[in-house]
Amino acid sequence: MGHLIKINLPGGFISAGDLYEILLIAESAGAANIRFGNRQQLYFTIENSQLEDLELDMLKAEINYEIDEDLHANIISSYVADTIFNHHEGWLREGVYKDIFDGFDHQPKLKVNLVDSNQTFVPFFSGNINFIASGTNNYWFIYIRFPKTDQLYCFPSLVYSEDIPALAKASEDTILQKKELFYGRPDIDESLFYKTVVKKLNVAFRPVTEPLKLPDFYLPYYEGFNKYSNKYWLGIYRRNELFPLEFLKDVCALCLKSRIGQIYTTPWKSIIIKGIEQTDRNQWGLILSKYHLNIRHAANELNWQIEDICSEGLELKQQLVRQFEEADLRTYQLCFAIKTQPKTGLQASIILRKQSVGLYDILHTRDFNPNLKDEVIYKQHIKPRELSKHLITLCNAFYDTQSNAIAVTALPEETNTMKEQSTIYQCSCCLTRYDQSYGDPVNNIAAGVDFDTLTDYACPVCEAPKTAFSLIEN
């Protein structure tokens, strides 16, 4: 009999040294692979015969963990996106994140999200207690998604950064101590909840004067070597969700050697290493080669949310990705979730929800916005082998709707001007094209950016310099 070990990584990051210590304990217990979860936590499995020794090692290392349980939800955050996916010059930076994490003196049982409003890499409302950065320095919106319901409530007040841990605990205590009022009910009294929580606190709230404004959903390409400032970050995704333990040990060792302090996990079950110097890049490439790791998967494979440790969901995803590839399907601005269990909290534009006897319903959110909870039923009781054709039709309908909206709103002269200004450059090394109309999502370059204005540009496929590109269409 095996056991599933779960370790929460608050905020979605861990020091290379601490991760290395966990890996040694896992290795000693016979684990071969590590998984990362939707809530930026860490998993591995061990045999029953190794459990007693593992518990002793964990105790000595003072590591909090759970065995075959999920009693404490990890605090997830958009800290992983800072500086690489969020180029907005706002007030939320590393120091603010870390001060908030340090303020938590309890392990939350409910899901807590801490998210910058200027990114879309980390979901905004997948937690029960969601803090979203406002436009006012060090103040946050508070959104409560009551457990086992789809009811989302926005506090009429903003909370200060240092008061977030206390508010999170007061909100959790209120929900769990008064389940008859605030847990799994269709008619929750939001005003009563707010008054009950506020009575427990002595903090300085600020009234909400402007509603939260979220950006349109866009999932950045989170794999491979990518340049930012004068350094690189490396994103690694695994198709089977398994990261070889030996590979992660080498990652930690190189981080320590090259003075990289932290390793980040993502809600897409991948890892990111920031701060790689140009002089160390070849060493990272050698590690990838040593373990035969591919870091250029298709975008339509990376934009899926699946329940943790769910073989049924993973197998279905892999089947659908193959069929998407055969159809050469565009999935830009869309993301997908497979829910085999009710109320999993996964968010997506298009949802596959398992019903009885292995059949699935296909739903999508209003305007295909993954941050909305208004779900529209598209198809019901579909066999797994028939899902792809319906999903392909739905995706194509999404883009047709977008095209029709553009055709209606754009003036003829504006359309002609854009066409005249569209330029395409091609890499002479691998024939990759840069089309101004689309930009370069891999390098976080928005549509409409003139190729001539780019500095330090490199081919997203072969990394040839900008000088290797030549104009082929004007």
Image: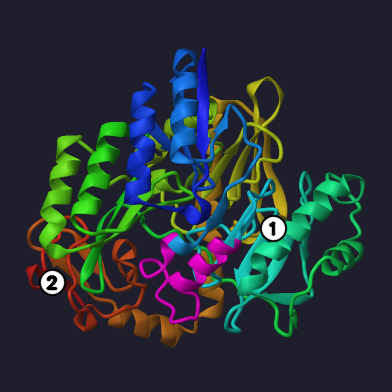
**Residue at coordinates 20% horizontally, 49% vertically from top-left?**
254
Front residue of this view, candidates 250 and 438 = 250
What whole-number distance in Å separates the C-alpha atoms at marks 2 and 1?
Answer: 45 Å
The part of the chain drawn in magenta is 80-103
Looking at the rendered structure, the kind of residue marked 1 is: Ile
Q: Which mark is residue 466?
A: 2
User: What residue is rendered at 49% in x and 20% in y?
Assistant: 52
Which image quadrant is residue 213 in? bottom right
Q: Earlier in the sequence, mark 2 or mark 1?
A: 1
Which quadrant, please, contains the C terminus?
A: bottom left
Category of crowding for the residue at label 1, using alpha-carbon neighbours closer than 10 angstroms: few (below 14), some (14–19), many (at least 20):
many
> As shown in the figure, which amino acid type bears the numbered disc 2?
Lys
Residue, disc 1? 129
Position above or below: 71 against 197: above
User: Quick check: is 75 in the magenta stretch?
Assistant: no
Q: Position of residue 28 (x, y in %)?
A: 35, 25
Q: Secondary structure at mark 1?
A: strand
